[in-house]
Every structure is written in structure tokens, then in C-alpha cells.
Amino acid sequence: MDTKKEMKKTRPMRVFIAVPSYWPSQDGVANITGYLAEGLARRGHEILVFTSAGNGGLQELPYQERHEGVLIERMRVFVRWPLVLRGRDRKSTKRFYRRRIASFAPDVLIVVCSQTWTMDWLHSGLDKIKCPKVFYSHGYSNLKETYHIGEMLRKRNVLGAAEQYLCKRYYKNLYHDISKYDLAIYLSKQSNAAEYAREHMLTNGKVLENAIDDAFFSGDMKHEYSSEPGNKIRFLFVANYGENKNQEMLIRAYAKAGIDKSELIFAGFEKNPYYEKLEKLSEECLKDQEKKKIVLNAHLKREEILDLYRTADVFVCSSKSETWSIVAHEAAAAAMPIISTDVGVYGEIEGAFIVQNEEEMQEAMEKLYYSFEERKRRGEAAYRWLCTKGCRIEDKVDWLEKELLALRERRKEVGEN
């Protein structure tokens, strides 16, 4: 599409994007929202990203700044969902959030993620927002087939029971809110969010699969395999530190694996209590294992993360749940062999080594450590799979821009009639 000619025909849009994390965060939600917001800004649209500072609102980031043509404004919100959504100052409240939407007067509002302030603080105010509204789901990590409320109460785990009860009630009613949006975007047809929509007969959904960084399509990113004896093998996991990413299982599997000269490298955005827990666990597990090393990285720049992809040998994922994992596609684009728990898209990736538990993770790490041929075979298979997916950023920006322009035009026609 000739974007310059296209922009001459259409008035630029004012787009308000509410998202729980954004640049300089490097998690999947931040990266995906980033390339879409920046892509729209490059095409002349006015983009406001309204987000929260990291680390529960404690990270020192400016209230307002511009990055790559996008205006960023931040609140400081402490989130322990579903129990707590609390602003840390007078500009970090439900009321301020709603007023900022009204004062910006967007042509389109995009709300990214449920299970946090972006969607939940609009629960009783959606009908007052007259512009077209888009819900962009990244999956429902707390949606369960069964909630063990009674079992937790019997164990006197009152807090756990309260969390389970609130999650159950939330998902029982969530579809009412989603139905009020003009468009709901899901990461894949197989995501639990898309399945939830089908179960509740929602008809406003479409699928926009993620793109990956254009850098992965450059020649220097494709993995070079080495069969030289004695070379150190590096295992890499790129993910925020948290219970759902389950890094502690990966540390235990690595420590038990019968492998010598190696490194297990983690890349998460920021340090938090779970990070500190992993530090202690790493020290305990690698006691008296001098040839092994665990590296816990935080606050890395994007180029530093790209360098990790270039230099690591095997990508590993220990998550308890995922949807359309962007790091899985990045690893495949780098032609890295992949070991993962059976979550999200990983089971679809050709050549991926899928494991069910810690013992199988240990065995998979041992197998790829000792077999150059196996690493090469699985990495090349993952790369072939990725090449069929059409993961370039501009294609995704094209799709989103057309959808938003169509929503604006439909709302304009309804207003004129």
C-alpha cells in the first residue's frame, strides 16, 4: 500500500491506546503495542499511549514523553489482580483515566488487555464513551475450567479462595463488557480468549496475529550452528519474571541435567520479588557445579536482547500458559531449536521439543546439549515454519489502520443518519 497517497485521501485519526505496559518495557504486550502505535504514527495519525510505570508503579519514568512519534502518558498503578487495582497518586485513578480519554477526544479508543486497570476501570463507563471502541486481548491467564474455592477454604487459604472466587465471577460476566466494543481483536483462533468469545456467541471478534521485529529478517540473525567440541552451549528464555513464566522449574531442570559447560540465560524487563526468589534458587541449585552458570538479566535494551538471540544456542520456555507468544516466533526466525512446555503456539512450531514437566525439560536439555545434529535439525525446521507465517510489522499495521478507519467511517455514517 502507498501510505503517503492513502493519507492524502483520509483525515488522520486521533487514537487513544490504553495498555498496562509500554516502552521501555520489553514484554510481549509492550512490544506488540509499540510496533502498532509507532507504525500508525509514521502514517500521520496522532497516537496517545496511556500506560502505567513498571514495577507496580514504582519505577521512575516521566509522566509524559514522546518516543518514535508516539505521545506516552503514564499513571502509577499497583496491580495485584483480582484483589487490588490501586493508583499511587492523584493522577493514577479511575476518574483521571476516564477524564483523559474525554479530553483527548479520540476518533478510536483501543483498550489492551483485560484483568487489569485498562479494561476494568471502564466497566461502568463504557456507554459514556461515544467513539468506536476496540478491545485488544492478549489472552486470559486466570480463566480456568475449574476453580478450587472449596478446597482452598478447607486448607484455610482464605486469600487464595477469594482470588479464585473473584476470577470466576469476573469471567462469568466479562462477555457483557466485550459485547459493548465495536471490535475485539484476538491473537489467534486457538487462543482461550477467542474460544471464550465463541462459547458466549460474541460476533465482534477478528484475529490479528503478531508480527516480529524486522531485525529478525536480516541475515545476521539466522543462527549459525557450531559442532566444535568443547563449545559452551547457551540456553535462553526471554520473558518477564513471574509465577506464570515458571522460571524456577527451568532452573531446577537445568541444575539436574547431566550437562557440563553451559549457561542458562534469562532476559526479563525488571527485578521484582520473583526475580529475587530466582537469585536465591540459582545459588542453591548450582552449588558445587562450577561448569554451569545461570545469568538473570533485567533492564536490557532491545539491541542487547537481539544479541542474546544471536549468541544463544537453544531457546527454552517453561511457562504455565501462553497465547500467541512473540518470543517463540522470534526464536524460530533466528532458527533456534526450541524446548517448551505445551502452551500456546509452541505445539504448532515444526521441530519444537514439547515437554510436560520438569523431568522431561531436563531430558530435552540433555539431548540438545549433546547432539549438534538435533539442534540443527530442529532449528532449521522452526525457521521453515516461521517463513510460512507472514510476520512482518507493516502487514499488521496495514490491517489495523484499515479496521480503525472503517470503524470511524461507520460511526460517522451512523451520526449523520
Image (cartoon, rainbow, N blue to C red):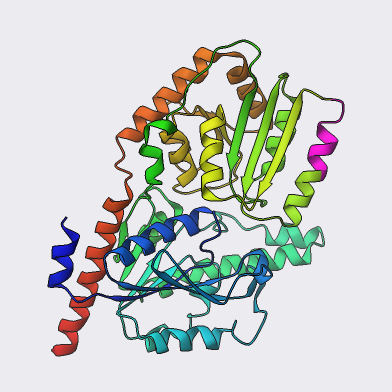
In this picture, residue 157 sits left or right of residue 334: right
In this picture, residue 154 sits left or right of residue 8: right
Residue 416 drawn above or below residue 60: below
Residue 153 in sight here:
yes
Residue 313 drawn above or below residue 211: above
| Residue 271 horizontal/vertical position (percent) | 71, 55
The residue located at (44%, 33%) in the rendering is 221
By secondary structure, the bulk of the magenta-drawn segment is best described as helix
Q: Which of the two residues, 151 or 324, is positioned nearer the viewer here?
A: 324
In this picture, residue 224 sits left or right of residue 262: left
Residue 342 in sight here:
no
When asked about the image quadrant of residue 49, the answer is bottom left
Image: magenta residue range: 280-288
| Residue 407 horizontal/vertical position (percent) | 24, 73
The residue located at (76%, 45%) in the rendering is 278
Magenta stretch holds residue 287: yes
When asked about the image quadrant of residue 7, the answer is bottom left
The residue located at (45%, 40%) in the rendering is 330
Magenta stretch holds residue 318: no
The residue located at (86%, 30%) in the rendering is 287
Q: Which of the two residues, 367 or 312, is positioned nearer the viewer here?
A: 312
